[in-house]
Image (cartoon, rainbow, N blue to C red):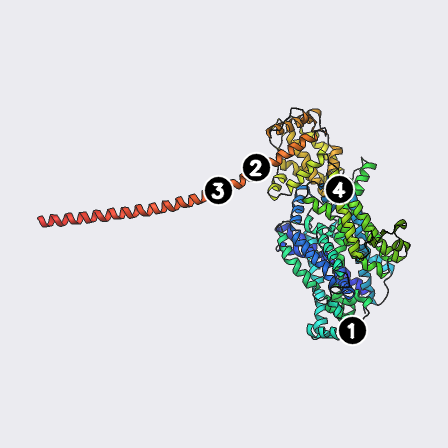
Amino acid sequence: MFSAGSLSAIVIVYMGMLFALAVLVERYARKRSGLRWQGAIYALSLAVFFTSWTFYGSVGFAIANGAQFFAIYVGAIVGLILGAGALKRMILAKESFRLTSIADLISTRYRRSQRLAALVSILAMIGLAPYIVLQLRAIYGAFEVLTGEPSSSGNGLVVTLLMALLTIMFGARRVDPTERHQGIIAVLAAESLIKLLAFIAVGLFVTYGLFDGFQDLHQNIQTANLEYLYSAGQEGSGYTWVALIILGAAAILMLPRQFHVTVVENADSKHLKSAIRLFPIYTIAINLFVIPVAAAGLLLGLPASAGDQFVLLIPQMSGSPALTLIAFIGGFAAATGMIIVTTLTLATMASNHLVIPIWRRIRPDTQLAASLLQIRWGLIVIILLLAFTAAEQLQAPYILVSLGLISFAAVLQLAPAGLIGLFWKTGNSLGAALGLLIGYLVWYFTLVVPPMVGEGWIDQSIMTHGFMGYSWLRPQAMFGFDFLPPLAHGVFWSLLFNLGFYWLGSKLYRPRKVERALTAELFNAMREEMSDRYRNARPTGLEAYIEREPKIQEAEKLLNRYLSDEKAEEMLGSILNDLQLGSRSHLTVVELMEFHRMIEHRLAGSIGAAGAHSAIEDSISYSDRESADLRALFSHLASELKLSQSDGRGQQIVSGEGSQFFRDLQKGNEMLNNEIAQLRNANKVLDEKLDRQYQEIFKYRLEAQRLNMENEALKAQLTLEIGSRAIEGDAKES
């Protein structure tokens, strides 16, 4: 047994070591401009996917459902491999638009809608709150097992506040969450190794310490009639397998913490190849001993209801305190990695898409520069305190066992708008909003209501008679589909309604010009060959008549609302340097547009793409001449594209009208891009032909040179022979 004080001291020392690692890695990265083995570190950081639900819960899941526990990890592997193209598109979009979260990605895809970003943020917090509760409950449970005493509210509160402090220290020390946190990525990679090695250590102890290897353990399983541990599950398990695979695939791509690690923290899209190679190996390794541990616990007489704690109980009852402590640290690493990254991403989404927009409406003149970071700190504490309160209230195993899968099903609702929207241009903001809302409502009704009924919070009649007495509105038998297992039932109907309303809304609603333009811009940015052009575009041409100083003062006023004076000055100086304006006192209208675009681009890293776009719209204005020049510029571009301007629609571009003109302009632009791509391909073919011709000419020249040399040698030899014969003739005559 361990005392609560000794465990707390071990936890503090452990987290102190991790923090020291993060600081040292960041210092090293600054000095050396990066880290070695970045691909491997990046791949290991993706293993934040494996939480305490894996470390502890997989054993309990296997006891109840056999090999079915592995289905969700099959889905994760399949999702990562098949979704690599989608992830690459997300990374390219992140580079071009400085995306900070999954909410930012979805809002940027659909006209930078602040409302849609807020909706995604709220739904993500509702859906992931149970998962945070699960991690906290796992930590409390581990303390109870090792101390032999029920964890008090005081100890739980201390652990929760420690998690908040660690989240702030590791990930919320800077305003801009798009700045790469190489320290926290190194910590996540280290924790991934720790939990993997800890679980393997327990598995090896069970298999070769308590038994004589896999063969002996297998014979004991057969003797005890525990073969069901190898089975695929109970009757109807095929539906559950499909549901779990879908959930795993969606989670590896759309979980906010996975998006942050995989996309926001990505330094090079080529690192995805390392992740695709290493992630499946890691997945198999960390699940290799799940069934042996489950079987060993049952064979040793441990109750099946305590399956989630077998990883701790087996070493403890075997009299191995060192291995027990290793297992505790492994489970703690699995839980803390998830808590830190998830809380960080949720706080970022809440501040960017909920707090700042509301604050800006209520007090538009308030300067947020000094408060933005503190707002995120406060949100981190609030989120974890709410999770702590829920963890204290939710004691029944029925609801706790369901928490992980309920959260995964919530994340699944982001997939239609977030994944399909990356490839389907027709998808629009109305379809995305309808799909998300209806999908989450069905998710709540089919997967959240039943556990609440089991807790006694909702009357049991809804399960038997249906909502408002309609039998076809029963949470686990909608429309009479009572043959599906509960999880498969909820996944099927929530995803079906989500997809259906996403498609229906996108077909019935024709988006405005602004949304179509942003969609075209995003799709161009997600094309690898086009992304550099978008990121490195620079202004050219036109008359420089716009006074520079007033525009800079206007930009300074905007930036100072959200950033410190020092940060705002640094950002502004960097933008002016990138624009290569030097000491010029006047700007062209194109340079002004590029100046504002770059401000929005950089500010998006601090308050999100949707928030930055709204801030620019609210704070930046154009004079009549500037607006007129912009209209003329668009008309000129249209004429260059040979589009008709006879109806004068180019005059309506800046004022927000003229959607047909802009659509034609976009089509023309796409046609030119396609023509350019075709010309590049043709040019590549010609270059190859030219290279072959050069090689043939070079060979011909070598052959000609050889023949000339042989000819000269023959001539010289012939001359010598003629000369020698002449000498011989003269000798004879004399």
For the residues labelled 1 and 2, the Cα–Cα distance comes to 71 Å
Contact? badges 3 and 2 (CB < 8 Å) = no
Kindly report which numbered mark, 4 or 1, lies closer to the viewer in this rendering. Answer: 4
Q: Amino acid at mark 4?
A: Leu
Label 3: element kind: helix
Element carrying mark 1 = loop
Identify the disc placed on residue 675: 2
Mark nearer the N terminus (4 vs 3): 4
What residue lies at 79% left-to-right and 39% top-to-bottom?
Answer: 357
Which residue position is annotated with label 4?
Answer: 504
Q: Position of residue 712 (x, y in %)?
A: 27, 46
Residue type of the residue flagged with mark 2: Glu
Q: Looking at the picture, tell me which residue is in the foreground, 95 or 544.
A: 95
Q: Are marks 2 and 4 in contact (CB under 8 Å)?
A: no
Horizontal side of residue 350 vs 178, given as left or right:
right
In the rendered image, the quadrant that contains the N terminus is bottom right
Q: Amino acid at mark 1?
A: Leu
